[in-house]
Structures are given as C-alpha cells and as structure tokens.
Image: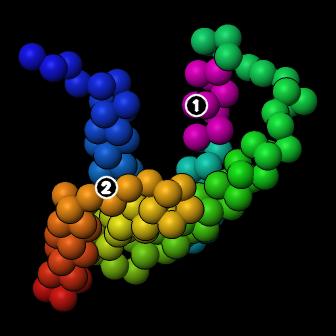
C-alpha cells in the first residue's frame, strides 16, 4: 500500500482550514469594515506564525534571505493581501456558498501560472479537473 506523501497531507490541511476560514470570516465580517477585519486576521496570523517559529527554534537572520527570495516573498505578500481584502469584501457582500466556490478558481489560475511561468506539464487529467472546477463554479454562481 502506498503511503500518502506529506505534501498531500499539508495540502489537504490547507483546504480544510481554508474551509473553516471561509465560515469564520463570514461570521466575523458582519458589522465591521472588511478591510479592518482583514487587518485583525493578519495580526492573528502574524502572532501564530511568530509563536510557531519560536517554539520550533526556526527564526533566521533577515540578512540570510537573498534578494531574489525577498522580491518574490514581497510579491507573494502583496498578492495575498489583495486576495484577502477582496475575499473579505466578497464575503461581506455575498453568501458564503457562492463566494467560496468562486474563490477556488484560484486553482485554475495556479495551474495556468504553473504552466506558463514554471513550464509545468498539463496532462489531460489536469485539463478535465480545470474544466470541472470552472463548470462547478459557474453552476454555483448562476444558481
């Protein structure tokens, strides 16, 4: 019997916690400015991450990070921040059951970016999966 690779377990954990994130964000964003809600969420994430780094002794010197890494982590942070701001506003304005599926179109974008910029292969299974994700998102959006 093949064991499940650790990356797959972490990816499943990410999906599970993202589902909880959607629920908790929808419940928490009512009655508050969505940008301020995102700020509070960011502070919590900062605290949790700092705690994990401290408990595991994984802090590193900022000077050990290359310019290349800084550039892409800064860009990733900007993209994450914009994503969260859009997501919280969407949750404030729309139902969770329709916002979350549209947000998961990020999978389609990620596959396209991997193909275009990282030269990752796209096989027929990926294309079928992308088609199903887009179709499912459209069905939920138009329902």
Residue drawn at x 33%, y 60% is 122
Q: Secondary structure at mark 2?
A: helix
> Which stretch did the figure color magenta?
45-53
Q: Is residue 141 magenta?
A: no
First reached walking from the N terminus: tag 1 or tag 2: 2
Q: Is residue 48 magenta?
A: yes
Label 1: state its secondary structure.
helix
Who is closer to the viewer here, 126 or 42? Answer: 126
Q: Residue at x 65, y 44 (%)?
A: 43
- The answer to whether residue 103 is above or below residue 43 is below
Residue 106 in view in this figure:
no
How crowded pointer 1 is (Cα within 10 Å; few <14, some 14-19, many 20+) is rated as few
Q: Tell me the residue that label 1 is attached to.
A: 48
Considering every residue shown, the one lying at the far right of the view is: 63
Whether residue 125 is situated above or below residue 98 in the rendered picture:
above
Locate the N terminus and report the quarter of the image it occupies. top left
Residue that appears at 59% across and 41% down = 44
The circle on residue 23 is 2
Q: Residues within 10 Å of mark 2 (few under 14, many from 20)?
A: some
Please identify the dominant SS of the magenta region. helix
Q: Is residue 136 left or right of residue 67?
A: left
Q: CA distance from mark 1 to mark 2?
A: 19 Å
**Above/below status of 80 relative to 69:** below
139 or 4, which is in the foreground?
A: 4
């Amino acid at each position: 019997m093949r064991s499940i690779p650790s990356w797959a377990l972490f990816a499943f954990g990410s999906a599970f916690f993202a589902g909880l994130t959607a629920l908790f964000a929808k419940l928490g964003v009512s009655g508050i400015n969505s940008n301020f809600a995102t700020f509070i969420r960011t502070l919590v994430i900062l605290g949790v991450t700092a705690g994990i780094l401290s408990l595991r002794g994984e802090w590193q010197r900022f000077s050990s990070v290359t310019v290349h890494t800084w550039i892409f982590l800064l860009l990733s942070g900007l993209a994450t921040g914009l994503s969260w701001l859009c997501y919280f506003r969407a949750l404030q304005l729309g139902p969770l059951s329709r916002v979350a599926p549209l947000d998961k179109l990020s999978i389609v974008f990620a596959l396209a970016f991997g193909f275009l910029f990282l030269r990752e292969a796209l096989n027929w299974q990926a294309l079928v999966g992308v088609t199903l994700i887009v179709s499912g998102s459209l069905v939920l959006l138009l329902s």
